[in-house]
Amino acid sequence: MENDMANHEAKDSKPLKYLTVQDVLWINLELTKKVRHFRFAKLEEATYYQYGYGGSRDLALQAGRFLSGFMKLRPLDAGNEATAFVGAVAFLFLNGARLSVSDSEGAEWVEQVRTGKIRAEESLPISMCPCHGEGAKVADAVADVLGLFPKTIAELLNHDESLAAS
């Protein structure tokens, strides 16, 4: 899974587009089909993992930090892994990149990130794509993620339920 972005930096000087706390809550609602309880301070901190230090221009690093940080903090009562995955991939789409992981390998890849076997923030496999870009809506990016990764999302939701039960 080769990364075709030099130094993982966004390809132009336009500012990156970010998900808001409200976007993340909406993603979780779309995934779990239910309004869930959340811990606001943790949800805000988990959402802000998208931002980088300094110039905030390392798209792969920021998406990887969001994915792993959100799963670590688990700010929602349900659907944390799936919400983190959909949010991270939507963040990439909104900024002209895509995750270079197939639907059949997505859940295993996320599990390796969650357990620390790989560090997404150091090696997120992405490539440039003609994804959304300027004027893009979060809903469109999320719809694309849902369409491209149905198996991954279903497995992540099932895994999250088993974590919550234990």
Image (spheres, rainbow, N blue to C red):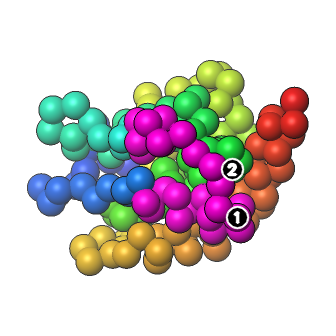
Expressed as whole percent of the image width and height from the top left, the position of residue 123 reads 47, 33
Is 109 magenta? The answer is: no
Q: Is residue 127 visible?
A: no
- Determine whether the residue tagged by mark 2 lies in a helix, strand or loop: loop
**Disc 2 marks which residue?**
79
| 163, 9: nearer the viewer | 163
First reached walking from the N terminus: tag 2 or tag 1: 1
Q: Is residue 30 above or below residue 123?
A: below
Query: Spatial distance from mark 2 to mark 1, Cα to Cα?
Result: 10 Å
Residue at 60% in and 58% down: 28
Q: Is residue 28 above or below residue 77?
A: below
Q: Is residue 38 visible?
A: yes
Expressed as whole percent of the image width and height from the top left, the position of residue 18 reads 32, 55
- How crowded pointer 2 is (Cα within 10 Å; few <14, some 14-19, many 20+) is rated as many
| 46, 10: nearer the viewer | 46
Residue at 48% in and 35% down: 42
In front of the other: label 2 or label 1? 1
Q: Circles 2 and 1: CB distance less than 8 Å?
A: no
Expressed as whole percent of the image width and height from the top left, the position of residue 108 reads 74, 40
- Per the rendered image, the range of residues in magenta is 22-47
Is 40 magenta? The answer is: yes
* 125 left or right of 30 in image: left
Residue at 42% in and 70% down: 138
Residue type highlighted by circle 1: Lys
Q: Quadrant of residue 153?
A: bottom right
Q: Quadrant of residue 66?
A: top left
Residue at 48% in and 50% down: 88
**Disc 1 marks which residue?**
34
Residue type highlighted by circle 2: Gly
